[in-house]
Image (tube, rainbow, N blue to C red):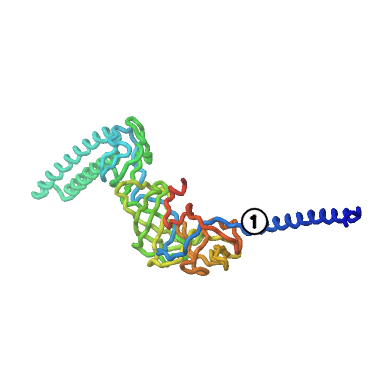
Amino acid sequence: MFKSPMVKMLIGLAILFGVVFGFKAFKNYKLAAFMKSKSNPIITVTATELKYAEWQPRIKSSGSTRSILGVDITTELSGMVKEVYFKPGDEVEKGALLARLNIAPDVAQLNVLKANATLAKINYNRDKAQYKIKAVSRATLDTDEANLKSALAQVAEQKAIIEQKTIRAPFKGRLGISYIYPGQYLSPGDKVTMIQNLDPIYVDFFVPQQNLHKLKLGQKTTVILESLPNRSFIGKITTINPGVDPSVRNVEVEATIPNADKLIAPGIFTTVYVNTGKPNKYLTLPQTAITFDPYGNSVFLITHNTNGDLVANQKFVITGETRGDQITILKGLKEGDQVVTSGQLKLKNGIRVKINNSIKPKNNPHPNPSEEKL
C-alpha cells in the first residue's frame, strides 16, 4: 500500500516535520517555564515587627568644654627668676607660691624705708609731747604727721613691689607647662604657666532660635565627649544668653557638669543632648528600613498573597525625629506591621520574599560612637 515512492517521501516528510515542530514546542515550553520561574524569584530580606517605643524629646547640639576659671599666669614686673617652686601639672591651692624674681635690691630698699618710717614716728611722738606743753607749733606737729604717713606709704609701696615679684596661684587649680627657669629674665606680661580649675567644668553649645522656648535653667543635659566616647556626663543648664546671634539665629547656652576625677579638659569637642519634655510613645523603625526620596519616604511592607506566600509591597510613610539608629513613623503604618529593614534595593511590588534575621541592621537608640568605628 505504501510502496509508492511518492507516498514514502510524504510520510518521511511528515515524520520529520513532526519531530522538528515537536522539539520546537517542547523547547518553547521549557523556556517559558524557566523564564516564569526567574521572573519572580524569592528575595531574602531582614524584617522587623513595628512596635511602640518610649521616646524622650530632646535637642541635639555640638559644643565645647571650658573651665570655670582658667588663665595664663604672667609676671607684672620685670626681673631675673630666682626660684621656681612648682612642678608642671601640680594641683595647687589659691595663693600657693609658684616662683620668685630676684628681690634682693627691693628688700634692701624696703629696709631703708622702714628705717625712715621709724625715724618719722620718733619725731612725731617727740613733737607730739612737746606740743602738749606748747614747746612746738601745731604746724610742726602736722608736718611730722605727714612725714610719718608718707614714710609708711613708701614702706607699703615697696612691700607691694616685692609681692608683685612673688608669683602665686590666683585660685585653686591644675598647673600647666612651665615656661620659666632660674636665671631667666622676665618682662611684664611674660607667660609663667597656665592654671585651670577643672571641677566643675562648663560646656558651651548653640541652639537654633526656634528651640529657645524649650530651654530653661536647671534643665538636664547629657554630654558625650569625642575623647571619651564610652562615657556620658550628666549636667544642667546654668546660663542662657539673653540675646540671639542675628548672623546665625542661634542662642548660646552654658551647661555645668561635675568633673571630680578631672577627666574632662577645656577645649574638647562635645555632643550635647537636652531633654525638652515628658517621654512619648512612637512607632519606631531602624533608619535602614526607610527609602528616602524627593517625592516621599517609603518602606516595603510584608504581607501574604492569595497563595499564602510572603510578598513585599512599597508603602509611603511620614517620618519624624531620629535618635541613634532609629526613626519615628508618624503616619502610614500601624503597630504589628512587618517591615523590611534591609535588602530593599532588590525589591519591587508583589515580589516574593524570605525573611532571614540572622544578621540584623543596628537599631540602637543610643549607639556607642566607638562601636560605630569598628
Q: Is residue 361 left or right of residue 215?
A: right
For the point 16% across and 50% down, which residue is it?
A: 138
Location of residue 347 in the rendering, given as x and y in whole percent from the top left corner:
59, 59
In which quarter of the view is residue 21 placed? bottom right
Residue 193 appears anywhere in the view? yes
**Closest to the observer, 79 or 276:** 276
The local secondary structure at tag 1 comes to helix
Which residue occupies the extreme front position in the image?
A: 1
In which quarter of the view is residue 89 placed? top left
Residue 138 higher or lower than 293, as above or below = above
Q: Is residue 359 left or right of residue 97?
A: right
In which quarter of the view is residue 297 placed? bottom right
Residue 299 appears anywhere in the view? no
Residue 265 higher or lower than 305, as above or below = above
Give, as a three-letter code, the residue at label 1: Lys
**Closest to the observer, 36 or 183:** 36
For the point 44% across and 48% down, which residue is it?
A: 371
Label 1: few (<14), some or many (≥20) within 10 Å?
few
**Closest to the observer, 101 or 126:** 101
Location of residue 333 in the rendering, given as x and y in whole percent from the top left corner:
51, 68
**Closest to the observer, 6 or 254:** 6
Query: Where does the N terminus fall, quadrant-wise?
Result: bottom right
- Which residue is label 1 attached to? 38
